[in-house]
Image (spheres, helix red, strand yellow):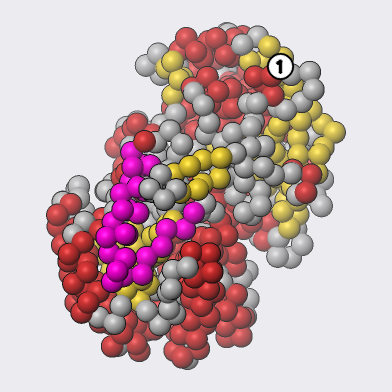
Amino acid sequence: MPEFKDLSVAYFSMEIGIMPDIPTYSGGLGVLAGDTLRSCADMNIPVMGITLLYKKGYFKQDIDSHGNQVESEVEWDPYAFLQAMPQEAEVSIEGRRVRIKAWLYNLVGSAGQINPIIFLDTDVPGNEDYDKKITHHLYGHDDKYRLAQEIVLGIGGVRMLESMGCTGIKKYHMNEGHSALLALELYNRLSGQKYPIDGVRKMCVFTTHTPVPAGHDQFPKELAEQMLGNMLEGKVRKEAFYNDKLNMTYLGLRFSEFVNGVAKKHGEVSRTMFPGYHIESITNGVHSFYWTAEPMRKLFNQYLPGWENDPFNLRYILGVPKEEIWSAHQKSKEALIRLVNRQYKAGMSREIFTIGFARRAATYKRGDMLFSDVDRLLKIAEKCKGIQIIYAGKAHPKDAQGKELIKRIIAKMKEVGHKIKVCYLKNYDMGIAKLLVSGVDIWLNTPQRPQEASGTSGMKAAHNGVLHFSVLDGWWLEGHIENVTGWSIGVHPEVSKENIHEEDVKDMYNKLEYIIIPRFYDERDKWVEMMKHAIAINGSFFNTHRMVQQYVSNAYFE
C-alpha cells in the first residue's frame, strides 16, 4: 500500500460506488467516481478518494401492487468492508465542534497498486444527536442537512487528509460542486499570501455534471452564515457568495484552474450557462473490465489479450468470429432472464427480443415514452416473434413526479402484459445494472435534450455488444453512427435544439417496427456485425482508462 504522504491527487465526491454491498451511491455520479478510482489504481496513478459513509445508505426500494415506490433504510455493517482508522478531524457547524472519524477502503488495481478511499463519519461519541446523523443518509432531508454534509465533505475532508499525513497532495479534484467548500478551507490556509485565490486555483480541478441551472447546488446566504460562522470571515467572504447565495458550482468555477464538462455537448452547454469561464470537455467513460460480463470477458481474454489494461485493444474485436460473440451474449442474456424469471415469475425467454431501460426515475428521462401509444406497441409485438421489456430505476424519496412516473410505467406494463412480457426490477443497484447492460438486446434512452450531460449506462452496454437506441444527447452525440453502433431517436440537435416529443415517439416506433426488430430476428449476421462495431468503436473509447489519461494530461500533473 502506498504511504499516505505519497498520494498526489485527492478526488472528492458526494457518492462513490465501489460495489453493491457498500450502499454509498445513488446513481451515475457515484458509479462514475468508483470507475474513475478503479482506473486510477489500474494505471498506478496515486489518487485518494474522499466521500461520506452513509450508514443508512440511499434507500432500499420496494414497489407495492399499485406501483407505488416504498422506501426503507438500508442496514449494512461498515466493519464488514472497511477498516476503522484512528485519525480524526473536526469542523465547526453552527458554532458546534463536530468530530469526524475515518473509514478506509483499499482499492486494488490490476497490477496490485493500492489506492485508498476514505469514508467520513460523524456518528462519533461526543457529537450531538443531530451531528451524529449528518453522514447517515445520502441526499436526505433539507438544505440545512445537505449543507452540513457538504461542510463535512469539503472542509472536513481537507482536514482529514492533513490528519492522515497526506502531505503530498498537489491537486484537489471536485467531482461536482458538493465538495466545493474545500476551496474555502484552502483559501483560508493561504490567506496570508497577497493573492490566495491564485494559489487555490493552482490546486483545484472541478468537474460539473449538470446541464440545467436548476440542478446546481446553492444555499441562502443567511443559512450559510449560520452554518459556517467564522469560516466566512476575512478575505474569503467576498469570494464565497454569488448573487447573495452560496452557489457550489460558482465556487468550483471560481477556485479551479481546470474546469470541465463531461461530454463535448455538455461542455458547450456549460460554456453558455457560465460565460466568462474557461470550460473544457472530457467525456465520461466506464471501467471496461468491471462492466464487461464474464462470458464476454472470456472471449476478450482469448482474442484480445491485454484489453483490460488497454481497452483500445477492443478495436480488434472486428476479427472475432460472429458466432462466438453471439454465443457470449446469449450466455449473459440467460443469466439475466434466469434472475427475472426466478424472482418475478416473468416467463421470459432467451430467444425473444429484449429491450432494457434502467436509470434514475427522473421526469426529463421520459421513462414512459416507450408506452406513449400502447396500441401501436401491441401491433408491433403482434407483427414480430415477440418483445420483452425490462425496466429498473429509483425515484428520489422527495421526487413526487419521479414516483408518479414509476407508477405510470407499471400501469402501462399491466396494459400490455397479455401480449408483451414485461418486468420492473426493484431496488436497482450496481449488481442489477451489470446483469441488465449485458443481458438485454437493446439499450433504450429517451432524455429531453440537452438535459443528459453524458450518461454512462449505454457505454456499459456497448462493452457487452448491446446496441444503443437513444435520443441524440450527451455521450451518444459522439458514439452514434446510425445502423453501425446503434440508432438515434428523433430529429438531430442541429435541426431542432429541443425535442419534438411527438416526432421522437413516431421515430422510436417506426425504427423498432421497420428496422430494429426485423434486423434482430431476420438479419442476425448484420445484427452481430453491429454488436462488433459497438464494442470496437464505443467500448474502446468510452472507458475510464482513456478518461483518466485525459485528466492526467490536462489537469492533474504539470
Q: Which residue is mark 1?
A: 128
Does residue 89 appear in the picture of this structure? no
Which residue is located at x 43 percent, y 33 percent? 398
Where residue 145 appears, x then y in whole percent? 55, 23
Which residue is located at x 27 percent, y 48 percent? 448
Residue pushed farthest front?
A: 65
Query: Could you tell me the amino acid type at mark 1?
Result: Glu
Task: Provide the secondary structure element on which disc 1 rests.
Answer: loop
Given residues 433 and 410, the one toward you in this image is 410
Up-down relation of residue 323 to residue 222 (above or below) = below
- Horizontal side of 495 relative to 358 (left or right) equals left
Which residue is located at x 25 percent, y 74 percent? 381
What secondary structure do most residues of the magenta stretch adopt? helix
Where residue 214 appears, x then y in whole percent? 34, 31
Residue pushed farthest right?
A: 86
Up-down relation of residue 211 to residue 90 (above or below) = below
- Horizontal side of 372 relative to 480 (left or right) equals left
- Horizontal side of 486 relative to 39 (left or right) equals left
Which residue is located at x 56 percent, y 36 percent? 138
Does residue 392 appear in the picture of this structure? yes
Where residue 512 appears, x then y in whole percent? 24, 71
User: Which class describes the residues within 10 Å of circle 1: few (<14), some (14-19), or many (20+)?
Assistant: some
Residue range corresponding to the magenta coloring = 401-426
Where residue 185 appears, x then y in whole percent? 63, 22
Given residues 386 and 97, the one toward you in this image is 386
Up-down relation of residue 124 to residue 424 (above or below) = above
